[in-house]
Image (spheres, rainbow, N blue to C red):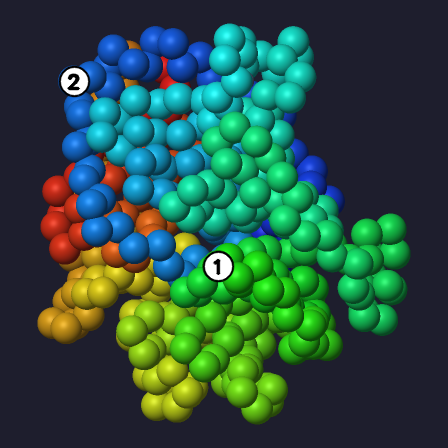
Amino acid sequence: MHSFKKAICIISSFIFITLCGCNQSKGDYVDLSNTEQKIKDSQLNINLDDFDYDDKPYNIMNLTTTVDSNYFYNFSIPNTKINLQSGRVQYVCQIPGCAHDEITSPGCISYQDIISPVAVSNGIYYIDGNKVMFFSGNDQTVILTNDYYTEYEAEIYPDNKSVITALVRHNNLLYIVCPTYYFTYNTDTKEITAPATISDSLCMGFCAADGYLYFTTENLELYIYKIESGKTEKIADKVGQVRAKNGYIYYVKYENEIPILYTAKADGSGSAKLLDDCYVNYYVTDNRIYYQSYVTKDCYQYDIKNKKSTKLDLKYTFSDGKEYINSEYLNIVSTSGMGFVFIINSTEKLIFIFEDNSTEYKTIEMEEE
Ligand SMILES: [Zn+2]
């Protein structure tokens, strides 16, 4: 049961960070000034003319990144963004004349905790305790303040009863996910719905599809919630993370300590095993699944139609001549409609950017030695 416990431990620490707003990496300092020259040699030229903002599930691996039509954002202190045209790495803060120094630049957003960011066309929604905030690029405003809680939150989080866990976007609705309930904020009409309780234990993963919500709990159970009837049904046990895509759901189920990827129809029926070894950081595009082996830590691209996996050879030579060797679990993130997938090694501050359906990639280094 080792991996199981480990998974729970990892999940718990992420939740702790999320719920407490603690900052796990304060003190890191990235000198971005040297990075620009190198990037000029490797322009990204990612054009996103018909970019479509859409679903971003709540997944423990995706609490710090988001993408809009111009930038890839990495909200891990200091908060930085990559220009998708030039490949240039910049601080998120746009205060004129700001030195972006953690100590001497009060108000610099590059050193603020931005939890569960969700980019839309004119800014980024994020969580600050029991508030949903909006960052326009210049200003940060309060969108709503949550004061609701159930007996569960009152008992488990007595000092922070109305804490918000994550934001999930589907169509024009922002799902505000709390430990045992959710409500929605319509980003067009600004209408807020009444809270709906969906679980009697902590919600650890959440995604929305047409007519359905899916969520996992701290007991690693997977549930489907039918929005119209308000009915909840259990789909599976020992489940890590869930995603919905094109009328199907994808979820990781632990078997003999190994995470296995399953798929099922949107209504939860017809579940079938898809991949024998798939860590919870997988990402699903229209035709491919990008995933990492839990056992070997190798990355793969799975062709959904042809049922074939291709290994992704992640190669990079650092400026000191050292060759990149992957030895950890990576973040695999994107947002559909963009046609690119980002595979991130946070420790090495390296990002491999794959054009979807291709095994070609570009590499961006977020930090120079
Ligand atoms: Zn600044």
Seen from this angle, which residue lies furthest front? 189
Residue type indicated by callout 2: Asp
Q: Nearer the viewer, residue 66 or 15?
A: 66
Picture disc at residue 179: none
Q: Examine the rendered structure and indicate whether residue 247 appears above or below residue 356.
A: below
Report which residue position mark 2 lands on: 41
State the separation of the CA atoms marked 1 and 2: 41 Å
Tell me what residue is drawn at x 74 percent, y 57 percent.
Answer: 146
Instruction: Assign the C terminus to one quadrant of the image.
Output: top left
Tell me what residue is drawn at x 56 percent, y 71 percent.
Answer: 216
- Mark 2: secondary structure: loop
> Can residue 30 be spotted in the picture?
yes
Residue type indicated by callout 1: Asp
Q: Point out the tag, 1 or 2, that comes first from the N-terminus.
A: 2
Question: Within 10 Å of the Cα at label 1, are there few (<14), some (14-19), or many (20+) other Cα atoms?
Answer: few
x and y percent of residue 2 in the render?
57, 61
Relative side of 148 to 9, left or right: right
Q: Nearer the viewer, residue 131 or 157?
A: 131
Picture disc at residue 188: 1
Can you tell which quarter of the image residue 196 is in?
bottom right
Instruction: Assign the N terminus to one quadrant of the image.
Output: bottom right
x and y percent of residue 263 in the render?
34, 77
